[in-house]
Amino acid sequence: MESRPTALSLAFLCAFGQAATALAGQDVVVGPETGATEAALQTAINAAIKAGGGRVLVKPGTYLLHRGLRLNNVKDVSLVGEPGARLMFAPEVHTVAAADAAQGETVIQVESAAGIDAGMTLEIQAPGHTYESPDGRKHVCPYFGATVASVSGNQITTTRGLRYAVPKGTKLLHLYNAILLSGRVSNVLIEGLEIDLNRDAWPVRPINHSEHCAVFAAGPYDYEKGPTGPPIERVTIRNCVLRNSHHRGVAFYSVVRSAVVGCRIENAGDEAIDFDHFCFHCEARDNDIRNAPVGVELNDPSDCVVENNRIDGCEKGINLWRWCKGEDLNLRNVFRANVIANARNVAIFCGPKTSQTLIVGNTVRGSGGRGLYIAGDENTVEGNLVRNCAQEAILLVGSRNVVRGNDCKDNAAPLKDAGKDNKVER
């Protein structure tokens, strides 16, 4: 790997496209001449982190990912792909338990341990912990994790005793994300990369939706307590192509002042873009999203902006809803000037206990369900164009919403106010 120190200054837009940020440190080039491998990329990333900042420039080529790239405790680092730089998941590594393994044991007999190595994280698709959803219902998680300590023949030894039993026939698979950001993270740019998660070569679908994502960033948080440490901040994903994930294209948890800008995201198995628990002041802007269950998901965010995106052929276009019970969540979000076409269900949804959302200047065409479904309170729905929806153009279920200046024609049903104290100008 070639490495040359520079007085590098790379300008990039932060979460709101405001001030430029200078990244000083190493400028590391990775390409076929230095080894177009995952290890070379990770070594370059580690060098930039150790230097206190820098740019990893990825030359054209296909880089197979077997464990994913990790950006842990990183500041002032950019990962930039030249045209033709492609990260691609290697085919799935999976197996089946050949015998029962009891809770607390450290050995699992499997039908084949081919491709499984020490250090790998496994998803074990057997009943795990019990958890409670906000409505009070209890659920059994259908998987749990383990880390491989060693492999001998078709015997896997785990680093700790199994948290739950592993019945014979249980599926085990190695999971990772293409790019994982964790720990103390600030001022990171990921730009110009094509990331193909190669879903067709992963026949066993992972259950954990926090794995098999193109970019996954998670700061520390607790569902009840909220953020439990400094959030990840000022991460920009820009001008990337993300495709063929079993789960998310980009997922942010407890992330602030960050953005997904100008990306093409297609064939995601879950949300194309997900601003999840305790994301504040984040943006999804100027993206082209196609064929996903949800174009942009917002679950317990506040002060986030979804603007000028093209969302086509998704089950839902924009989906805002509440999971956690904390205060100051699901407030003051903005959905502006998006074009949502051919949603198979609702184009824009604001769930119960969401409030003060500004939904303005969007175009909705050809929704298989409702155009806009507003179940929250005190939202503003203004200047939207809604055409050719299979149900109501706009359905109001919440209260004290303001609806005015919308152009709703050629839908199966017009605007319907089934809420309370809404102010509607038809």
Image (cartoon, rainbow, N blue to C red):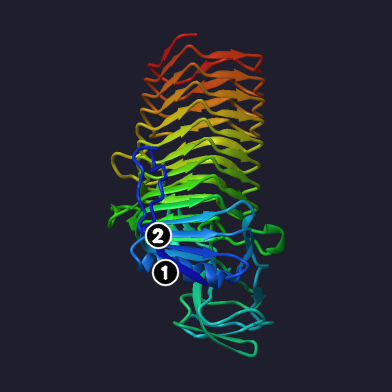
**What amino acid does circle 1 point to?**
Ala
Left or right for 391, reference 299: right
In this rendering, the count of numbered labels is 2
Quadrant in the rendering for residue 73: bottom left
**Residue lying at the far bottom of the rendered structure:** 152
**Camera-side residue: 285 or 367?**
285
For marks 2 and 1, the one nearer the N-term is 1
Q: Which residue is mark 2?
A: 54
Q: Residue at x 47, y 34 (%)?
A: 306
Residue 279 percent coordinates (x, y): 37, 45
The kind of secondary structure element at disc 1 is helix
Taking depth in this image into account, of 37 and 412 the one nearest to the observer is 37
For residue 129, say whether it is visible: no
Which label belongs to residue 28?
none
Q: Amino acid at mark 2?
A: Gly
Q: Residues within 10 Å of mark 1 (few under 14, many from 20)?
A: many
- Residue 271, percent from left and from top: 55, 46
Dot 2 crowding, Cα within 10 Å, few <14, some 14–19, many 20+: many
User: What label does residue 47 carry, if any?
Assistant: 1
> Could you say whether the residue bearing mark 2 is in a helix, strand or loop?
strand
Q: Position of residue 405 (x, y in %)?
A: 48, 11
Q: Are marks 2 and 1 in contact (CB under 8 Å)?
A: yes
